[in-house]
Image: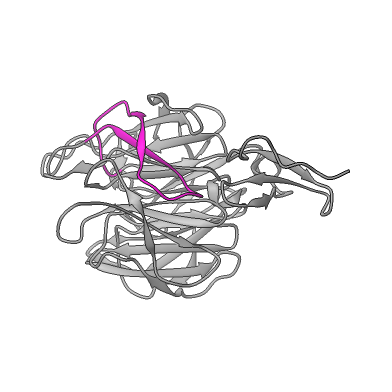
Amino acid sequence: MTQQPPLQPTPAGAFRFNTTSAKIEYYDGNQWVNVSSDSPEAQTGGTRGIIGGGAGNGGNFIGYINVDATGNEVDFGDLSATGYEGGATASRTRWVCNMGYVAPADTNTMEYVTIATTSNSTDFGDLLNAKRCTGAFGNSTRGIWAGGYPGQNTMDYITIASTGNAKDFGDITFTGNYIAAGVNSPVRGLVAGANPGSYINRIDYVTTATLGNGADFGDLQGAKRMMSGNSNAVRGLWSGGRLDPSPDLTDQMDFVNIASQGNAQDFGNLLNEQDFSAGCSSSTRAVICGGYMLPAPSVAHINTLQFVQIMHTGNAVDFGDLTASSGAGRGALMCSSNGHGGLG
């Protein structure tokens, strides 16, 4: 009997059992991808989001949350120093951050923790250059940091399972990119929003498993920077940010289907107009962590955690609070999880 094609195009997020490979697969909008036999539940009893450092009252604090539940941040351990405006990515087992700004200067230092075990961070290696305000993303194998202050358009990558210094991946298409935010599927990494002299609405993408320069994906709803990035294997979500012309902040959320190219669409609104937040994700949820409610020089750090369901549109809902040692808010955090979109 001849197999007939489906009556409708396969939707992104559909599942199937591949009788040849005997594996469960999902459709990312472009191709069928194996569902990993590992899971956040097997590693940590649920998707664990790691939240490191931060300006305001963060110090060298590392906290964690269970993305699949609600509640306040819990103490995980400490970074080696007070760092903020860095970026983080993770595999199922490791969280890796670049430290960003460590007074009195930017640094190229990377540190990591084992997500399942609470502890202080350990030195991983160095980025190619000292930088902060990078757009971080990755898959189960690689971590990538794109752009960075002051005015860098390079991308650095590491192999998460090993330690060592970063290598050159390629360049972002817009020169002088910094304060962008990254999202990812198992196949692609995207960075959006930046400030190469003036704010832009550009979204760039790369294929994470290869090396090469970024390519144009589409545009955000408006020119902005300092957003948080969240994703599952299908959708990328950017939240909040600072609009052009500054100093206006926004509560707007944009989303894209990562496997296709095109402009972002409206998702909903955050609880506050804010910037310099950071994101932790599971296959179903996006948690937006901390941030600033007022633009400089009258910055007000917030301790709010809020979440949305990634495959639905709608406004954010209260999740809990950040609970750094001071009990106050913080922004410019380094966040990722063992269940983000790059892990399938």
Percent x, y of residue 83: 33, 56
Percent x, y of residue 47: 59, 39
Point 83% across, 50% down: residue: 22
- Evaluate whether residue 63 shows in this view: no
Residue 7 shown left or right of residue 141 in the figure: right
Q: Nearer the viewer, residue 331 or 6?
A: 6
Q: Start and end of the magenta stretch?
A: 250-276
Tell me if residue 255 comes above or below residue 260 in the rendering: above
Most extreme residue toward the right is 1
Quarter of the image with the N terminus is: top right
Point 45% across, 29% down: residue: 308
Point 39% across, 56% down: residue: 87
- Evaluate whether residue 217 shows in this view: yes
Q: Nearer the viewer, residue 62 or 196?
A: 196
Percent x, y of residue 339: 58, 44
Q: Quadrant of residue 97?
A: bottom left
Tell me if residue 52 comes above or below residue 64 in the rendering: below
Percent x, y of residue 331: 30, 43
Q: Quadrant of residue 319?
A: top left
